[in-house]
Amino acid sequence: MVKISFKWLKAPDDLSAVFAIREAVFVREQGFLHEFDVTDQRCLHLLCSADGIPAGCARIYPSEAGRWQVGRVAVYPQYRNLKLGAAIVAECHKKILALGGSQALLSAQCQAAGFYQKLGYRITSEPYLDEHCPHVDMAREL
């Protein structure tokens, strides 16, 4: 059985493992050019490890009055069979609730919208392009 663990980080913590996962998934695998931004300096980053090895990540930050943005949910390809994506999103929800939040928002790639719908999210926008990839806004009450 694989032991899954979570660690919350915030700049100036060492974010290199989180950034390596995002680089592998969003830049090298999916071809995004603008993966890293100033938001990385002000948000909370979640690092998910499998048997002590970095395997997935996400980030959260407050949006407005109890609403929190969830984003950059990524899992290395070799760990995707462990259902870490759902575990990462659930851990984000727990943290948002602990911080007094009541709603999670995200911008999902259209190809991943079904995954988030299974986790209780609803689509709140028409599709739009983020770089080369169609996305939709989604929300979930916590």
Image (cartoon, rainbow, N blue to C red):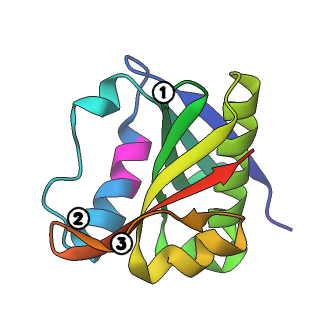
- Please report the residue visible at 35 percent of the width from the left and 55 percent of the height from the top: 22
Counting from the top left corner in percent of width and height, residue 42 is at 37, 22
Mark 1 or 3, nearer chain start: 1
Judging depth in this view, the residue of 99 and 59 nearest the camera is 99
Residue 6: mark in rendering: none
| Residue occupied by mark 1 | 64
Q: Residues within 10 Å of mark 2 (few under 14, many from 20)?
A: some
The amino acid beneath tag 1 is: Glu
Counting from the top left corner in percent of width and height, residue 65 is at 55, 24
Q: Which residues are magenta?
A: 17-21
| Residue occupied by mark 3 | 126
Counting from the top left corner in percent of width and height, residue 4 is at 75, 54
Q: Name the mark nearer the viewer: 2 or 1.
A: 1
Q: Residues within 10 Å of mark 1 (few under 14, many from 20)?
A: few
Q: Is residue 14 magenta?
A: no
Counting from the top left corner in percent of width and height, residue 85 is at 62, 65
- Please report the residue visible at 40 percent of the width from the left and 56 percent of the height from the top: 21
On-image quarter of the C terminus = top right
The answer to which image quadrant residue 33 occupies is bottom left
Horizontal arrangement in the rendering, residue 25 relative to residue 8 (left or right): left
Q: Which secondary structure, mark 1? A: strand
**Which residue is at the far right?**
1
| Residue occupied by mark 2 | 27
- Please report the residue visible at 61 percent of the width from the left and 76 percent of the height from the top: 115
Mark 3 or 2, nearer chain start: 2
- Please report the residue visible at 64 percent of the width from the left and 72 percent of the height from the top: 117
Judging depth in this view, the residue of 56 and 129 nearest the camera is 129
The answer to which image quadrant residue 104 occupies is top right
- Label 2 to label 1, Cα distance in Å? 29 Å
